Amino acid sequence: MSTAQVKYIDVSNERILEKKKKAYGITRESSLYKNITLFIFATVTLAFSVVILYGYLNIAQQNRKINALNSEIRSLETEKDDYDIKLEPYKSVDRIEKIARLNYNMDFPKKEQVKYLDKID
């Protein structure tokens, strides 16, 4: 081989090596590893984002349930208060005494009907 042929082969080999490299000295193999790493990172990030959003969705649903139950509690308390107001005239001591005297012939006990018991220690 002549010197010119050896120089041509060396220059050819250098060009082949340069074609294998990308800008800034990154080879195709390292670029592939970087792309795979980037893809895995993006996938993991997406998975965490989905899990976090699912958690927030659960929290929002529980808040809606709590608000619905609180409004139901308020309406039931209002209904109870309405019933208490309707029941109040029936709990009057005067009314109960009047019904006891008229319907059941009841009266307050007389002094001779009352007996006191001594407490024994």
Image (cartoon, helix red, strand yellow):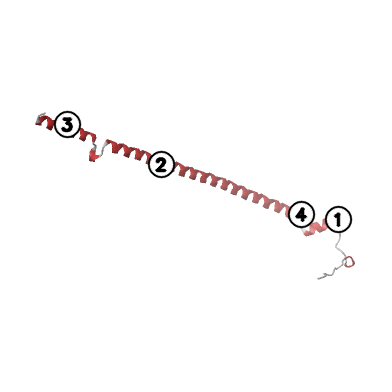
Q: Amino acid at mark 3?
A: Ser
Identified at 40% across, 39% down, the residue is 43
Q: Nearer the viewer, mark 2 or mark 4?
A: 2
Figure check: 113 above or below 86 = below
Picture quarter with the N terminus: top left
Q: Quadrant of residue 96?
A: bottom right
Question: In the rendered structure, which disc, 1 or 4, sits on the residue that comes first in sequence?
Answer: 4
Q: Secondary structure at mark 2?
A: helix
Residue contact at pointers 3 and 2, CB within 8 angstroms:
no
Mark 3 vs mark 2: in front: 3
| First along the sequence among labels 1 and 3 | 3
Please name the amino acid that badge 4 sits on: Tyr
Secondary structure under badge 3?
helix
Label 1 and label 4: CA atoms lie apart by 16 Å
Decide: few, some or many residues near mark 2? Use Cα within 10 Å; few <14, some 14-19, many ≥20.
Answer: few
- Residue wearing tag 4: 90
Left or right of 44 in this view: 3: left
- Rounded to the nearest angstrom, the CA distance separating label 4 from label 3 is 112 Å
- Residue located beneath label 3 in the image: 12
Q: According to the image, label 1 marks what residue? A: 102
